[in-house]
Each structure stands twice: as structure tokens, then as C-alpha cells.
Amino acid sequence: MSTGVSRRGLTDAMRSLHSVPIMDLAVAQALWAIDRLQASQLPTIAQDALEVGYDSPALRMLAGLIPVDVHLAPDLFQRALDELQIHSVTPLNALHLFIRYRHSGL
């Protein structure tokens, strides 16, 4: 079954990931689902999310994590998504969201 995404296009998109600003928790969740984010990036994503209006207890805790506690980030990120009712995505849907995000020019 074809997903409509060429292997080369996907590889190029993934290579340029680090130039993509993460402005939305749904995009961050998609990147997390396809292993394109590190736990150490999650507190900054939470801080950005708070700045644009997202809010939940776990998101606040995640935003305030210090580097020594980064091992707590994945669980806090999932709790924040649950609290904000941002539903889980499959890896394939996450990949499609990531590609749409990359091609949107944001």
C-alpha cells in the first residue's frame, strides 16, 4: 500500500527537521511519535506552548523542568497532551502531519 510519500522526499524532510520551529503541540506530538524529538527538547516546547495560550498542570511542570530532571519529560509531555485533550496519533498520521507542516512554509 502506497502512502504517496517517496522515500527520498521523506528523508529530505527529516534531514531538515532541525530548521523547523515547533509552534503547535500537535506537531510536537507528531514529531515525538516518529522519534524526531529528544526528551531534552520537550521543556522548551512546553514553554513555547504556554506562551501561545496552551495551559495545563503537566505542561507547566514540563516547562519548568531542569536538565537533571529531563528523564521525567516524556511522561509529563504525555500527561500534558492528555490534559489538553490532544489525542494520540499513529506514526503514519504523524508522518503525514509532519510533511504537511514542513511544506506549509512555517
Image (cartoon, rainbow, N blue to C red):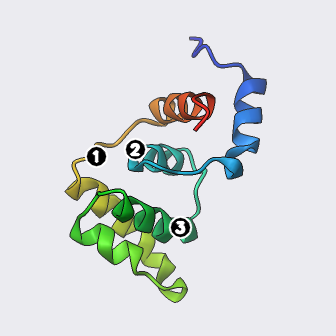
Q: Mark 2 or 1 closer to N-term?
A: 2
In this rendering, the answer to whether 37 lies above or below 6 is below
Label 2 packing within 10 angstroms: few (<14), some (14-19), many (20+): some
Which secondary structure, mark 2? helix
Q: Amino acid at mark 2?
A: Ala
Residue 81: x and y in percent read 30, 55
Image depth: mark 3 or mark 2 in front? 2
Q: Which mark is residue 26?
A: 2
Q: Mark 1 or 3 closer to N-term?
A: 3
Query: Distance from label 1 to label 3 (Cα)?
Result: 18 Å
In this rendering, the answer to whether 85 lies above or below 37 is above
Q: Is residue 100 left or right of residue 20?
A: left
Query: Distance from label 3 to label 2 (Cα)?
Result: 16 Å
Residue in the foreground of this view, choosing between 49 and 59: 49
Q: Which mark is residue 39?
A: 3
Q: Which mark is residue 86?
A: 1
Label 1 packing within 10 angstroms: few (<14), some (14-19), many (20+): few
Residue found at x 23% / y 53%: 84
Q: Amino acid at mark 3?
A: Ala
Which secondary structure, mark 1? loop
Q: Is residue 31 left or right of residue 6?
A: left
Which secondary structure, mark 3? helix
Residue found at x 28% / y 46%: 86
Label 3 packing within 10 angstroms: few (<14), some (14-19), many (20+): some
Q: Tell me which corner region of the image, top left, top right, bottom left or bottom right, holds residue 87.
A: top left
Residue 61: x and y in percent read 32, 77
In this rendering, the answer to whether 6 lies above or below 78 is above
